[in-house]
Amino acid sequence: MSQNRWAQQTLWGWGRYPRVESLVARPERRKEVLDALADRQGDPVLAFGLGRCYGDAALLREGRVVLTRRLDRMLAFDPETGWLRCEAGVSLEEILHTFVPRGFFPPVVPGTQFVTVGGAIACDIHGKNHHVDGSFADHIRRVELLVADGRVVTCGPDEEPELFWATVGGMGLTGLILSCELQLARIDNPYIEMESIRVENLEQFFEVSAESGHFTHTVSWLDCVTTGKATGRGIFMRGRHAPAGTTGGLSLLSRLGRAAPALINFPVDGPDWMLNQATIKAFNEVYFRKHPKGQVNSIVHYEPFFFPLDAVRNWNRMYGNRGFLQYQFVVPPDPSHKAIRLVLEEITRSGLGSFLAVIKEFGERQHGGISFPAPGPMIALDFGIAGQPLFDLLDRLDRIVLDAGGRIYLGKDSRVPRHVFEQMFPELPKWKAVRDAWDPGHVFQSELGRRLGLSGGQR
Ligand SMILES: Cc1cc2nc3c(=O)[nH]c(=O)nc-3n(C[C@H](O)[C@H](O)[C@H](O)COP(=O)(O)OP(=O)(O)OC[C@H]3O[C@@H](n4cnc5c(N)ncnc54)[C@H](O)[C@@H]3O)c2cc1C
C-alpha cells in the first residue's frame, strides 16, 4: 500500500535549478492526503503545487512531497458576495475559466495563471494591484491546514490568527493547505483599459508611478542594461478592469483554449549562447524602440495584460539546460532611489545582463513573518545560471538591499545565504516561535527551509 502511494521522482521549480529527487504522492481526495502524512515513515513532508516558484521552496531531498494538483475541486460559491471555497490544488487558470464568464476575477494574480491557490497562499503572492488591494492573503478568510500532528485546523484572520499569518507567505512550512475561502472581485467583462507609456529613465518611472495611483494595476518593464542618462528606461503599463459595454477580441490563449500547451511551446532547451550580453542588449533596444514615444491607450483581453509570458509554454527552457534564477527584492521608499540605482549600476558593471526585468511600487500592506511584500519599489530580474560570477553579483546586490532595509522574495530564491536572510526578515523569530508551536519536530521541511535554517536537517 505505502509502496504504491509513494514513487520516486525528480522535481524542479520554474528556474529548473536545482533539481531534486524525492518520493512523491498524488492524492486525489483529502483522506488520501491524511493517509499519506500518516504513512511518511518518519520522513519530512512538503506540498508541491504547480512548481511555479523558481528555486528550491517546493523541493525536498530525502523526504516526501505531496503533489496537490489533483485536489482540484471547487466546493462552494456565493454569487452575491463572490466568496469561493475550493481545494488547494485548484489553479488560478481554472478559476479564471470558470468565473470570468460569470463576472468574477481572482482578487490578486501573479505574472502567470498556472499557480495553485495553495501555492498562492504559501508564497503570499502579489500582483500588479498591490498598491490598491494588497496581496493574495488579504482576500482569504479561512484556510484548512493539515498540521504536523495530523489534525486539520481551520485558521484565518479571526480564527487561530497566529497560525494563519505564519502560513501566509510561510512557504509550506507550517502545514499542508487543503482548502481555502477566497473572495473573488466583480468584473463586467474580460477586458482591461490599458495605457502604456514609454519612460525614458528612472526619474520618469517614479513620476509616472506616483501619478498612477488611480489605476488599480501598474507595472513597468525595465531595461536594465542601458546606462547613463537612460538608466532605468522602460515601458510603464497601467490599467483597470474595463466598464460594462466594453468590447474587444478574444485573446490568442482564449481562442486556443486548453489546446494551447501543445500548440505554442518552447520545444527544446535553448543553446547556452542564446542569452548573452549582446542578445540581451539587442532585445532591450528593440523592445524599447518598438513602443512609440509617449503614451498608447488600448483595450486588451486580460490574458496578454496579466500573463504575457503564458503565451509561450515552457519559456523557461530558453535559458538552456543550466537553468536560471530570479532575483526579486523590495526596498523601503527613498526619494533619492539610491538602492535602485546602485543595483542597476552593479548589474551593468558585472556584464551579466538580465533578460527580463520589471519594476513596480508596492503599497503599504504587509503581513510580517517571512511574507515578501512590503512598502516601496520592487524589482524582479531574471539571470541565466552563470556560475560564480553570477553568485558574486547577487551577493553584492544582497548587500545593497540589506543596507537599504529591504528583502528578497523567497518564492524566487535558490541561493540567498542564511545570515543575509535572517537580517532581511526582522520578524523571523516570531514566525519561528509560531511554527515551532505547531510543528515542534519540523515535519514540514523544504530545501529552502534547510538552507535558511528554518527547518531541521539544515546542512
Ligand atoms: C512566469 C511567472 C511569473 C510569476 N509572477 C509572480 C508575481 O507577479 N507575483 C508573485 O508573487 N509571484 C509570482 N510568481 C511566483 C508564483 O506565483 C509563486 O511561486 C506561486 O506560489 C507558485 O504557485 P505553485 O502552485 O506553482 O506553487 P509551488 O511552486 O508548487 O510551491 C510554492 C511554495 O508553496 C508551497 N505550497 C504549494 N502548495 C501548498 C499547499 N497546498 N499547502 C502548503 N504549501 C503549499 C510549496 O511547498 C512551496 O513552498 C511567478 C512565477 C512565474 C513562473
Image: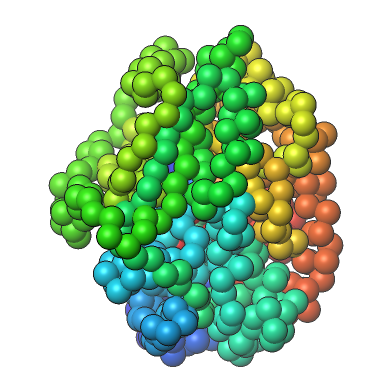
- Give whichever of 10, 259 is nearer the camera: 259
x and y percent of residue 60 in the render? Answer: 54, 60
Picture quarter with the N terminus: bottom left
What residue lies at 77% left-to-right and 26% top-to-bottom? 336
230 to the left or right of 265: right
Q: Is residue 213 above or below residue 184?
A: above
x and y percent of residue 51 in the render? Answer: 44, 56
What residue lies at 63% left-to-right and 31% top-to-bottom? 206
- Give whichever of 418, 249 is nearer the camera: 249
Q: In this view, does 79 lie above or below 344?
A: below
Farthest top residue in view? 228
110 to the left or right of 151: left
What residue lies at 66% left-to-right and 51% top-to-bottom? 363
What residue lies at 82% left-to-right and 46% top-to-bottom? 423
Farthest front residue in view? 245
Q: Is residue 329 above or below residue 46?
A: above
x and y percent of residue 3 in the render? Answer: 39, 78
Please identify the quarter of the rendering in which residue 415 is found: top right
Tell me which colouring the rendered structure shows. Answer: rainbow
Observer able to see residue 68: no
Observer able to see residue 216: yes
319 to the left or right of 215: left
Please identify the quarter of the rendering in which residue 294 is found: top left
- Give whichever of 311, 81 is nearer the camera: 81
1 to the left or right of 434: left
